Amino acid sequence: MKISLIVPCYNEENSLLLFYNELNNVSKDMSDYDFEMIFIDDGSSDKTLSILKDIAKDDSRVTYISFSKNFGKEAAMYAGFCNCTGDYAAVMDADMQDPPSLLPQMVDILKSGEYDSVATRRVSRKGEPRIRSFFANTFYKIMKKCSKVEIVSGARDFRLMRREMVDAIVSMCEGNRFSKGIFGWIGFKTYWLPFENVERVAGKSKWSFGKLFSYSLNGIFSFSSSPLKIPVYLGIILSLISFVPFGFMLYNAINYGFSMAINGVSDNLILFTLLLVGGLILLSIGIIGQYISRTYDEVKGRPHYIIAQTNKENVVKR
């Protein structure tokens, strides 16, 4: 049995050797299995690629694939899925937040034959800023409400999968990728393995609040059409609200005359109504525009990634 380990890397020079050494120690304890380590250099600007080349010289199990620029973690994971050859495959972060020590337990669960994948989820967010934890939990609640895809709170991308599940992921070739949603959409039986949050061994998170917010929106728009219902509901609500000033004017017209009815409408009320309606119209156009934008991106059919360097023969390009 072969296990493929897919490791997206972006400016990981400070943690890469620590991660590889830990991974190497774990693989020695799992001598019954062959290992394939696929490191995806996602356009790093530091010494990540140089370190990967040095590792690959001494370890034939190591494959590195270097992108021509930063295409994002989703593209890196997809490249790994497209090029892995193992019976099992796992995605891991190089910052040690996905503990390699969990791999033996994950393999044992898959060997039972009861599950198709073993996915990890954090039971706590210790060490993470509270505001970030709040928005993360809010995102999971929104996804649970508006999407039929199961996305478990605290879920990590770190999971071990059977070959059949990997092939299903590769077959989903959309450009706007949201892997947590894809994992849930394709189905298969998943065992959720809880673990305590582990802080990164070096460096800082590459995910700023803005990037996380954009990624969250991508997940919502990719796996839910519920936002398209918002303009409909807003239209109904505004239509009902519009009867309030109209009723007020009608009452004044009947009792005090038409001129009094017009004067009785406050300028502030008119201004507020115009701003409210204008803002809601822009919001509705923006929501529809998000879906049109994603359709436009898919129609162009650009590759998910472009490979600049690799030591792998017959590399798969998508």
Image: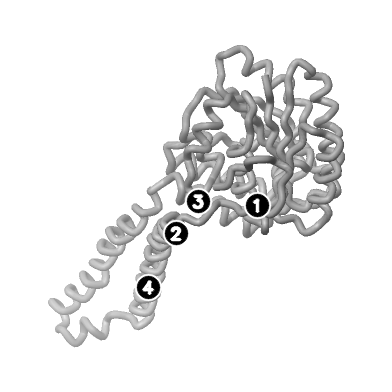
Identify the residue at the far top of this view: 112
Tell me which label, 2 or 1, sits earlier in the chain: 2
Tell me which label, 4 or 2, sits earlier in the chain: 4
* Left or right: where 140 falls relative to 270: right
Tell me which label, 3 or 1, sits earlier in the chain: 3
Task: Tell us which disc is closer to us: 4 or 2.
Answer: 2
Label 2: which residue? Answer: 300
Q: Amino acid at mark 4?
A: Gly
Label 4: which residue? Answer: 278
Q: CA distance from mark 2 to mark 1?
A: 19 Å
Give the quarter of the image for residue 248.
Answer: bottom left
* Left or right: where 25 falls relative to 74: right
Quarter that holds the N terminus: top right
Badge 3 element: loop
Q: Amino acid at mark 3?
A: Gly
Percent position (x, y) of residue 172?
47, 40
Label 3: which residue? Answer: 175
Identify the residue at the far front of this view: 313
Q: CA distance from mark 2 to mark 3?
A: 10 Å
Badge 2 element: helix
Disc assigned to residue 307: 1
Q: CA distance from mark 4 to mark 3?
A: 33 Å
Q: Are marks 4 and 3 in contact (CB under 8 Å)?
A: no
Q: Residues within 10 Å of mark 1 (few under 14, many from 20)?
A: some
Q: Residue at x 45, y 51 (%)?
A: 221
Q: Residues within 10 Å of mark 2 (few under 14, many from 20)?
A: few
Identify the residue at the far left of this view: 254
Disc assigned to residue 127: none
Badge 1 element: strand
